[in-house]
Image (spheres, coloured by chain):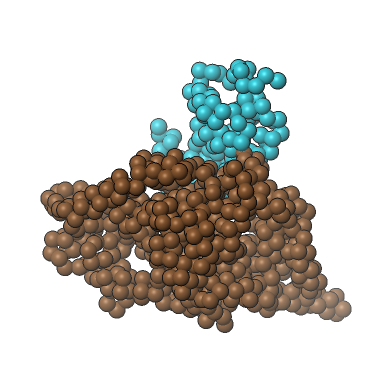
Amino acid sequence: MSTGKTLPIADLPQDDPRVKQLNVKMKKEGYKPDALIEILHNAQNSYGHLPLNVLQYISKALKLPPSRVFGTVSFYHFFSMKSKGEHTCLVCTGTACYVKGAQKLLDSIEGKFGLKQGQVSEDGKLGVQAARCIGACGLAPAAIVDDEVQAKVIADELIAKLTSKLEAHEQN
Amino acid sequence: MNRTDFKNIIQAEKTKEQNAHTKNKILVCCGAGCISSGSEDVLKKLQEEIKNRGLEDVEVIPTGCMGPCNQGPLVKFNPGNTVYQKVDCSNIGEVVKSQIVDKQPLEDMLLFAESREKPFVNANEDPYYKKQMKIALKDCGDLHPEKIEDYLLSDGYAALDKALFEMNPEDVIAEIKQSRLRGRGGAGYPSGLKWETVYRYVNDQKYVICNGDEGDPGAFMDRSVLEGNPHRVLEGMAIAGYAIGANKGFAYIRGEYPLAIKRFELAIRQAKKMGVLGTKILGTDFSFDVEVRIGAGAFVCGEETALIASIEGKRGTPRPRPPYPAESGLWGKPTLINNVETLASIAPIILKGGEWYSEIGTPKSAGTKVFALAGKINHAGLIEVPMGTSLREIVFDIGGGIQGGGQFKAAQTGGPSGGCIPAEYLDVKMDYDELTKLGSIMGSGGLIVMDETSDMVDVARFFMEFCVDESCGKCVPCRVGTKMMHDLLQKVCEKKATQLDIERLEELAVYVKECSLCGLGGSAPNPLLSTLRHFRHEYDERVQAERKSSNLVNQKQNV
């Protein structure tokens, strides 16, 4: 195997800005296997999740067995190979939130939208996730709706917020 | 930049500060807690308000965490240390008018106005702050975390300067040893000893790692330190690098803490520009560079060998020790791993001396400890107290008692590796050894208060579920044992268990504890064992309930 002379054979469209960004990151890290996690963070940031062909592309570029890349992705909670949904609701289930009723929030979401944690609605509009702890324990129970932290969440308000997000989405 | 230039810069900043026309400072807490309560909007509105009123002698500064997150957004007026709580865009105008224009504090909105007979105009006189002692959290909540100048004005990088020019590495290590500082990540290993071990290994390449993978649910100390005063941690890392002979450091920060990552990366850039990080620091031969590594959400990565694997880009699975990272760590090189809070305590120890630090706290646990108070407690938030402060003082004097006037049932420390402290031990002196005696651990500092509505069997099940999910799967006792224990606990919760199941649980707990490869498995049974020890009746009630009902069935059949 030649070492780093040519770029790996492209099976992703090279004019895609996300691919360009990924290439820049991999080059910056010198195609070192050590930088795998950093590169995966970068890819997930631009793609929203980690599609299989992107993983194959990274595995070729870093000259790592696909099993090693897949093994790393599946190990860490932060990485996801499935799309997380256009709108996301992440409910914190850390200890403080647990004590203050995080389960009630998840139950009411399931009641309203029929989605359990880790599931995405069929139309891909809403994804529900649970986090181990987002570190906002002083304001438990907490949730993150589309990157915005919600403090001292009340189930009905959360449902209303999600519903309005989805409705606004449809109007657009 | 050499030492003289550096001193000149500090002098220039001091002069600038003295001559500044902005004598009044309004500090807006922009810690993660207050931000989610809307403090960034308050900050903007406040800046507009000041401008509209033409108050030219007022400076508005966003700061790190001030402590009582539950009362946020918090706004502090200096000089005078007057803190207002639950400030929002609608009432900030009124606050500015009373406090600055009329010079008459608005009592209804002062910190803890609802629970104090007469709230304190100077917040430092409130028992909440009076009982605390801030060393690791010093400046956190008082300075702009994104400005290195603010840190310099508060003796920033003075400890690094002192270490580089007045001490040799042996002196630095001796100072840390004398301070009797113990690792704040949870295990409590003497930091000086750890430094000395790494120092003794001869190698051309050594590393310093800052462990900011705060995976323990219910803990947010490291987050607040990294967000509120990133330079302090960076300075601690550089001093550690000088002491052990490392020229490279890594800060491993949770991916769930984007603000901490952003501020720490900014701090690195500023420090390099200032010449207190990078090559030939302050003109000496010592070079030290720091890189941030972002965690990807795995609790086990808080374990040092797993964390090293993760920095190397691999699955975060631990490996057997020895060899310890001190001998063979990152890429096989001698590596020093310290927790964020430990590193944040280094600079004051160097400046004020190890003896000063060792006199705080208890004989075996010196210094102060940061706790993250959460759960059913009135003043949830971040506190720092001397070691040996009683749980009662923490929960009632500082924490303001139980929310909704409930009864204190237990405090949980150490997260999934720790245990519960029941009401009869409220007077326990919080230090490493006392907590271990009670079957809990100090842990990283998460302290969750529970009232009588909390079901202790379910608490044990909750933590076991966490361990099942977070077990890396490498060793059988942890992978299978935690799952078995979880299923048995589930059975107890559903009132389907028998006395035999409880015995099985106790037996399994010992096996998992003794046979697991790393600390995750080794401590996974702790919440179970501790609830069994202090709340056994809650287990028995469910088992007996089951037996009674089955007897009832038998009786009916006999009839």
Is residue B411 or residue B363 the one in the foreground? B363
Q: Which chain shows up in brown?
A: B
Q: Residue A6 is drawn in which quadrant?
A: top right
Residue most extreme to the right? B558
Residue B340 on image: x %, y %:
50, 55
* Picture mark count: 0
Task: Residue at 76% x, 64% y: name it.
Answer: B514
Quarter of the rendering occupied by the C terminus of chain B:
bottom right
Q: Which chain shows up in cyan?
A: A
- In the figure, is residue B105 to the left or right of A97? left
Residue B407 on image: x %, y %:
50, 78
Residue B334 on image: x %, y %:
62, 48
Q: Residue B515 is drawn in which quadrant?
A: bottom right
Q: Residue A84 is drawn in which quadrant?
A: top right
Is residue B292 or residue B522 the one in the foreground? B292
Quarter of the rendering occupied by the N terminus of chain B:
top left
Q: Tell me if residue B515 can be seen.
A: yes
- In the figure, is residue B46 to the left or right of A100? left
